[in-house]
Image (cartoon, rainbow, N blue to C red):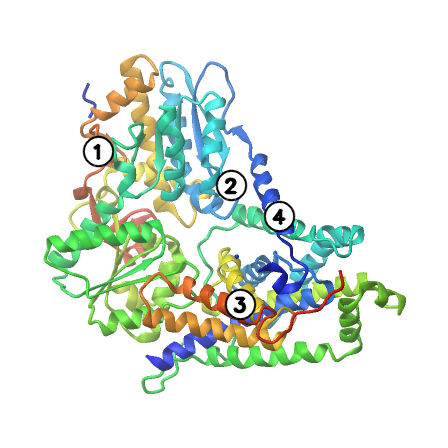
Amino acid sequence: MSIQNRSSSLSGNLTRRSVLYGASALTGSSLMSAVGSAFAQNTDTIKIGSARALTGLVASSFAPLYVGVKIAVEEINAAGGILGRKVEIIEADDESSPAKEPAVVRKLLDSGAQAILGPVGSSHTLAAVASTTPAKIIHAGGGWTEELADGKKYPYQYQFTYNTSHQGEAIAEHIAEKLKLKKVGLLLENSALGESGGIATRRSLKKYGIEPVAVETYPLNATDLKVYLNKIRAAGADALVIWNSPAQGILLTAAGLQAMKWYPALLGGNSMFSNVVLENADPEILKNASGTLLKVFTYTQNENIGGRQVAHAKRVINFPESKQWEINAAISPFYDFLHLLKVVVDAEKKFDSERVKAAFDAVKNYNGMIGRISFTPENHCALTGDQMVMATLLSGKDPKSMHVFRERA
Amino acid sequence: MWFDTVVTGLTAGSLYGLIAVGFNILYRPTRVFNFAQGDLVMLGSMGGAILLTQMKLPWWVALVVAILAIAALAVLEERVAVAPVLRQSSHGHAWIITTLAVTMIIVNIVGKIWGPDPIVVPAPAPFSTDMLPFNGVSISSYQIALIILTLLLVIAVERLYGTLWGKAAMAVAEDRDAALLRGIDPNAISRWSFALGGGFAALTGMLAAPILNASTLLGAMLLLKGFASAAIGGLGSNQGALMAGYLIGLVEAFSALWLSPGYHNGVMLAVVLVVLLVRPGGLFNSLEARTV
């Protein structure tokens, strides 16, 4: 089918027993997470498990990516549901901790989930696939690392988004072909994303005969990035590629560049598009800054945004949880996952993981919201590198952007 | 580049020192190590940022409101999470769990209210985070003010222990039961210590915000290094905390300059380990002899 840390030394009061007591209390707290249905409960429904952070540090930051779930469920149910049954989303809280993912997956399965979406984040998703893979359940994670596209390693997990490989390609092409720059410095946060992004960028730059003049890795709890930036500048870089997930890293980078009065071409992933960066970074820095974005969410002077994406954006920005991160809400991987799941299951006339997997593996050029979606048994990433482009940060101030779209760089 | 690195180290070191002094204010009279201290700093920072950027209050007003609010929250923590367990056993360690629980509650609540995107906070006038126009030197008026203010705050906290209240607090720290026999109310001292520690945490958060931005990640960002500063400075020693803060800040900055990328936290922790192996009580403290 083809569908397009000696404790007594410190104080004399802390003991090993005390510390173990504390640790066991922390572990015990994990038992408090709950499974709940976010939508109407009905026995005659298709249940989809949603692994997500409802509490903890990333709860509000990852919430925008679940807006696509709400919209998709509404649309699917309005169109008759899947196999004529309404879609019901069952939510389980991972408390913002990757360590909780196996228990979350177990709870969702015990609650009758026939497929699972989420969690968001590469490390969270990698922790979840360790459970969804042996359970042989169709799973759409919200991670961007290349590893998650390996259909042989994770045969039931599908990446309905771009990954760091595609971003690296777009960044390298932009530096070499458009900016015509040769001296590139890399500033990477010490995380899975920073490592993966750094590897992808170096690999892609190599295709253009470019070897970075400096590669600096900073710890996530760094308080000042000027030392790293000074080293990159001293190496002669005229383009700076930064890989970090939270906006804090970009703001510290911008503060460092501003202090140094150094304005190189600044390139990075889509975390560059945070509204807080747009509103607070030095305009001189923003002028030379661009981030990776899905081509269908960009425009040029001659090329407008697709009507379908505009209509979707209008719905997305009305959700309160979309505020500050409208782009992430609009390009949520879960919207296309649910719609494609409906198409496949309805065509198969049965919700069977093996048959759904076989059908997903055969999908070619499905017209998704995020672009043309294709899978193979080996490649479980929905998109190809040519669907990723660089877009300017400053265009976020253009009313045409609707806080969602950006002008191609 | 050398002077820039020293400035970076001293600026970060001042913040680590302030976090460590906050720990000490609570630890000295109560022997309680408040694991929620980092989150109180974060709340002070976020609360102050909202008062400044959304409610448009003057910096000094926002500072006073944030200090009072976080001091009240710290007293609530003491009443709910610390005093009951100390009543059951003044030498017990159940406070480890209860202060950790407070941390978890705070993290869960703030995660639902605020995202990780930071709030950019301007430096209080007349200071600025813009670099001063010295030839080849990168330092802002706010960095100079922060380094000097940190020294003044440590001196002020030390002077506090010379007052009647401070001596009472030290008496409670020495022997809670004996202090009670001398007419000192350990519970009141404990409450006031938490209020003072909470207020100091809010002040630290407000001072950190113009440099690090206000974010829900601020507590986690500073807690480990603040704890390390308190440990290698010698628990209870404010001069030690400040010196250790500078040491950690400078080690961190110079390791970023000289060493392979990605090993900076490891180097900082190695320094902590070496100092504690050589001087288990910390740089400015000696081990206590206890009869057991």
Q: Which residue is mark 4?
A: A22
Do pointers 4 and 2 mark residues of a single chain?
Answer: yes
Q: Which residue is mark 1?
A: A379
What amino acid is at disc 4?
Answer: Gly
Q: Which residue is mark 3?
A: B277
**What is the chain letter for disc 3?**
B
Q: Quadrant of residue B132?
A: bottom left
Residue B211 image offset from top left, x and y in percent: 46, 69
Where disc 1 sits, the SS reads loop
Q: Nearer the viewer, residue A104 or A163?
A: A104
Horizontally, residue A42 falls left or right of residue A260, namely right
Residue B131 image offset from top left, x and y in percent: 38, 79
- Mark toward the start of the polypeptide (4 vs 1): 4
- Whether residue A281 is visible here, answered yes or no, is no
Horizontally, residue B197 falls left or right of residue A371, namely right
- Mark toward the start of the polypeptide (1 vs 2): 2
Contact? badges 3 and 4 (CB < 8 Å): no
- Which numbered disc, 4 or 1, marks the residue closer to the eye? 4
- Which numbered disc, 2 or 3, marks the residue closer to the eye? 3
Where disc 3 sits, the SS reads helix
- Which numbered disc, 4 or 2, marks the residue closer to the eye? 4
